Image: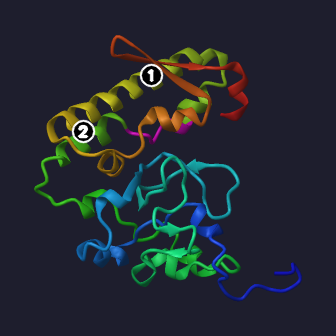
Amino acid sequence: MPDHIAKTGCDRCGTCCTKGGPALHEEDGPLLQNKRLTPEHLVTIRKGEPVFSLSGADPEPARSEIVKIKGKGVEWTCFFYQEKEGGCAIYEHRPLECSLLKCWETADLEKIAGRNLLNRYAIIAPQDPVLPFIKLHDEICSLENLARMLAALKRESSQHQSMSALTDLVNSDLAIRSQALARFHFSLDLELFFFGRPLFMILKQFGLNMHEENGVYSLSLASSSLSAL
């Protein structure tokens, strides 16, 4: 389509779908109740985890928990996007954000961004035995101070202390996940919904690499990565 022609309709290019799956809102509850979506289709973005906003060029800490449709493999491309067909596998039952999304006009989507979001506690049954593990994980492995801890790595005076705190957080994160997995034997898909992405994976995008020795994990940061924090 020539640049001088204003876009007024979807041409099924798939660009929106390759940027990530939609966040779920309370209005999407029936999709879960009717099994159109299941927890295996979802990933949790925890409060404080770096995310990209609609207009922001750099990631910002998530202001609240976000449950969204997961990507494909290590990519963010929506799980339900069909590349060959150029369409959506659940188009007739797509979430609210997808029904409002217009790449040429984002006003409708911006009105609901961050509002009435579903979280794990609204999706998981109250009697589910995995809930105590999730609550413990939220308490011990909170990401609400992650941005501050990453910023502290830039300062020589606080770098060692921040690295030590992040290392402790990584070990606690993995320990609780391992305990839950040993008890319930759930899949990786469910782990990403129950606990979100492992902290070491989040930190990797900031140049922090994890190392394991005798079951203990440590972090290292290349000096060239400081500018990316």
Tell me the magenta residue range. Answer: 142-147
Label 1 sits on residue: 167
Picture coordinates of residue 95, whole percent (x, y):
43, 76
Instruction: Using the image, determine if residue 123 lies above or below residue 76.
Output: below
Q: Is residue 12 found left or right of 33 in the rendered image?
A: right
Q: Quadrant of the C terminus?
A: top right
Q: Is residue 57 found left or right of 92 in the rendered image?
A: right
Q: Quadrant of the N terminus?
A: bottom right
Front-most of residues 149 and 229: 229
- Disc nearer the start of the sequence (1/2): 2
Label 2 sits on residue: 136
Amino acid at circle 2: Leu
Q: Residue 120's quadrant in the figure?
A: bottom left
Residue with the most extreme bottom position: 8
Picture coordinates of residue 205, whole percent (x, y):
59, 37
Instruction: Using the image, determine if residue 213 lies above or below residue 102.
Output: above
Q: Residue at x 31, y 34 (%)?
A: 140
Q: Is residue 193 covered in magenta?
A: no
Pointer 1 local density, CA inside 10 Å: few below 14, some 14–19, many at least 20 = many
Q: Which mark is residue 53?
A: none
Query: Main structural element of the magenta stretch: helix, strand or loop?
Result: loop
Q: How is the image coloured?
A: rainbow
